[in-house]
Image: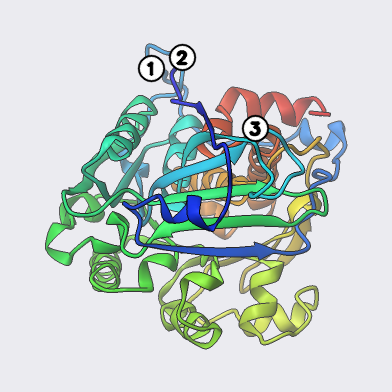
Amino acid sequence: MALHSTAFRFTAVSSSSRTSVTHYSGSAIFRQNNIKASGFSSRSTASTSRCRVEGKATTRDNGLPEPNESSLVVCFGEMLIDFVPTISGLSLAEAPAFKKAPGGAPANVAVGIARLGGSSAFIGKVGEDEFGYMLADILKENNVNSEGMRFDPGARTALAFVTLRNDGEREFMFYRNPSADMLLQEAELDLNLIKKAKIFHYGSISLITEPCKSAHLAATKTAADAGVILSYDPNLRLPLWPSPESAREGILSIWETADIIKISEEEISFLTKGEDPYDDAVVRKLYHPNLKLLLVTEGPDGCRYYTKDFSGRVKGFKVDAVDTTGAGDAFVAGILSQIAADLSLLQREDKLRDALEFANACGALTVMERGAIPALPSREAVLHAMLKPVA
């Protein structure tokens, strides 16, 4: 299956070379510290051998499980092009060449679910340009329903340059302001598609600017009114917001409407203004009365889970990390694919732990390749990794 990966060479990286990209009127550069790149910690083969993974026995012609429309997960938000350096351990300025790879957190989750044999759809907007058409093809090739995808003739598809340096620091540069994903309007929403979902998943980047913010809120309300489970991954990208205060306010403005929330250690510290993300009492402050499941990802160390009745930790898998981009999205795809197939996971701790081990394996496998969508694993690869150490 073609993944449209191509190397792009830039002969120089300077302020003048950046301004030469005339189609993109704005950019943002930021770094995330303390991202562990050494891998995911190991869990014994004995414990993985008893895992139960939910799914149907029927298959498609290509050997993947047949998706069940009643377990549809609709993902809302941005889809863009990630440019990843062909050589690891260099800053963006030092990288001699880049490989383009489709990305964007909600789109990553949609493709991840489909790769795992689940049923998914994507709602969002891209430019009416070559990159936009490429992204639409990627969704179709991965069996993601793209009926809710829109094309903007007046704005370009967003670009992001991503790299992982030797010191474990991820560096990003976005080209948007405005990119097409920011311009999705409420009138362009496929409301019928949203109402068909078992789970409606979204992030916070679509809350930053209008008209996409209003479209986001309208889509979420439609899903909630239809009894759809709401899944939220804030996916903090601080420099895209006007200020840290506006980011915190925006992320928390929809917090109490979500049924499932996935956050990272760094996001806990940000939302609680510096409190200890490893303190259960601190995490419990973020648990609102209507929440069904709060998940905290810990990179190579696995994840923690919190419900009204129980909480715990599930260890990860040890791998040699190449690129951590998309690992969290692969984790979300893994757990949502399982919950969509069996809602009893939200009440049964034993089944939830098995599903989270599956999700941890999804994240571990993803960091072993460059790019987000190209690295998302198949169901077969995940099950193999759970039975046999991946590194």
Q: In the drawing, what numbered circle is on residue 86?
A: 3
Q: Counting residues from the N terminus, which is met first, the one under dot 3 or under dot 1? A: 1
Q: Position of residue 299 (x, y in %)?
A: 74, 53
Distance (Cα) linking label 2 and label 3:
32 Å
Q: CA distance from mark 3 to mark 1?
A: 35 Å
Q: Which mark is residue 127?
A: none
Residue at horizontal 65 percent and vertical 50 percent from the top: 93
* Residue type at the position of mark 1: Arg
Name the secondary structure under disc 3: loop
Classify residue 149 as left or right of residue 141.
Answer: left
Q: Residue furthest left?
A: 187
Residue at point 79%, 80% (across, down): 276
The quadrant of the image that shows the C terminus is top right
Number of numbered markers: 3
Q: Which residue matches tag 1?
A: 60
Question: Please, is residue 242 above or below residue 81 in the view?
Answer: below
Please name the residue that numbered disc 2 is placed on: 63
Q: Secondary structure at mark 2?
A: loop
Q: How is the image coloured?
A: rainbow
Residue 30 position by quadrant: bottom right
